[in-house]
Image (cartoon, grey):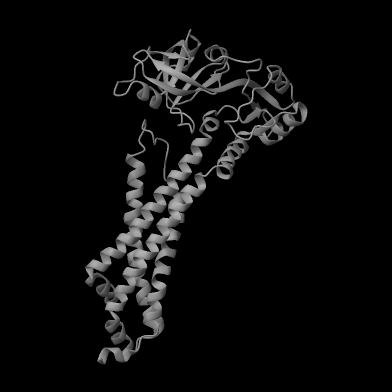
Amino acid sequence: MAVVALRMLFGDRAKYLGLVFGVAFATLLVTQQGGMFVGLMTRTASVIEDVREADIWVMDPQALYIDTVRALRDTDLGRVRGVPGVAWAVPFYKASAPVKTLDGRIDNALLLGLDDATLIGVSHDVKLGRVEDLRQPDAIAIDEAGYLRLWPGEKLRLGRELELNDHRAMVVAITGASAAFTANIIIHTPYTRALDYLPQGRDTLSFVLARAAPGQTPAAVARAIAARTGLQALSSADFRWKTIDYYLAKTGIPISFGLVIVLGVVVGIAIVGLTFNMFVAENLRQYGALKAMGLSDLRLVGLVLLQGTVVGLMGFGIGLGLAASFFEFATQPPGALRGFSLPWWVAAGDAGLTALIVLLAMFASLRRVLVLDPAIVFR
């Protein structure tokens, strides 16, 4: 019976290709949008993930996520260092700054100020140069994508100069820093130099980065810091999820991507459902002949499910392959979509959605097969 079912399916080539196209389109749309959404949410916390040495972030008590920067007092750094369980603590500066190349190209950059002594917080992925050279006068490190944005089409080269808020800055290192959510250019420089680049008020400390002492958990030390200082202290993992949760709850990003995914599912059900219904309608005589030969309703349902399974697997494979190709080629660094990827669990979730689309599309067709009168063969 399986051979008969497949011959019926492949025999109507136009409808078979239409069914595969419908499933592939829905799979491509849902998978691509799902991967883009995950990548976008990951970008919101990319600065946190790039600071690998610290496992605790200390900030203003009212801070909701990483981009709500309210400066702390300089004395707060010493207070954090004095909390039992803190191995070390360093200052961290975060702000937006205008940049301008010598040939007049203007853009906006994310300026990150690192502890002068340790340079904790700089990206570990160094494409060219040495981060130790940041201690030189006017030295900065710029991410590769930002470099190519300011000097498009040119090879990576150290010694480039630019104006950072009307101050001279010289590129001494090029990094592979993760793409940020709020800026296309990421610049690292020592903390004191970052304060010189931008006009400041009385308080300048954006965050305090700390690490739990051996034998202590970051969450427990963070609670101790909050209790002792009155500041908000979170482990890196908790701060990352707090930032992502803010964008999920307070922005329209989830709704926008969710509507597109729902649209893909609805269109897939419509295309596959209508096409499969036409396929069954045109093959009612064949189904009726099988029923007249004594084939049970259960076997007929299995026959139709086999046809739907073949269509679903073919369409899902094509759609997933196209989505994977998109993420493979369109997101290569240092492009604007760098860092986006297709997690395995997004593909697994889409496999479940594809199965749901095929089952819902076949529901009406199954009913027509079950109530079919075998006598239709003789009419």
Q: Using the image as rendered, state which of residue 164 and residue 27 is in the foreground.
A: 164
Residue shown at 40% from the left, 35% from the top? 338
Q: Is residue 34 above or below residue 144?
A: below
Left of 80 or right of it: where is 256? left
Q: Using the image as rendered, state which of residue 108 and residue 94 is in the foreground.
A: 108
Q: Residue furthest right?
A: 228
Q: Quadrant of the N terminus?
A: bottom left
Q: Is residue 2 visible?
A: no
Q: Using the image as rendered, state which of residue 365 and residue 8 is in the foreground.
A: 365
Q: Quadrant of residue 17?
A: bottom left
Residue shown at 71% from the left, 35% from the top? 220
Q: Is residue 15 above or below residue 34?
A: below
Q: Quadrant of residue 75?
A: top right
Residue shown at 36% from the left, 81% from the top? 369
Residue 28 position, x and y percent, is 36, 53
Q: Quadrant of the C terminus?
A: bottom left
Residue 56 position, x and y percent, is 64, 30
Q: Is residue 340 visible?
A: yes
Residue shown at 27% from the left, 82% from the top? 286
Residue 357 position, x and y percent, is 41, 64
Residue 45 position, x and y percent, is 53, 35
Left of 223 or right of it: where is 175? left
Left of 6 or right of it: where is 127? right
Left of 140 or right of it: where is 277? left
Q: Is residue 66 above or below residue 270?
A: above
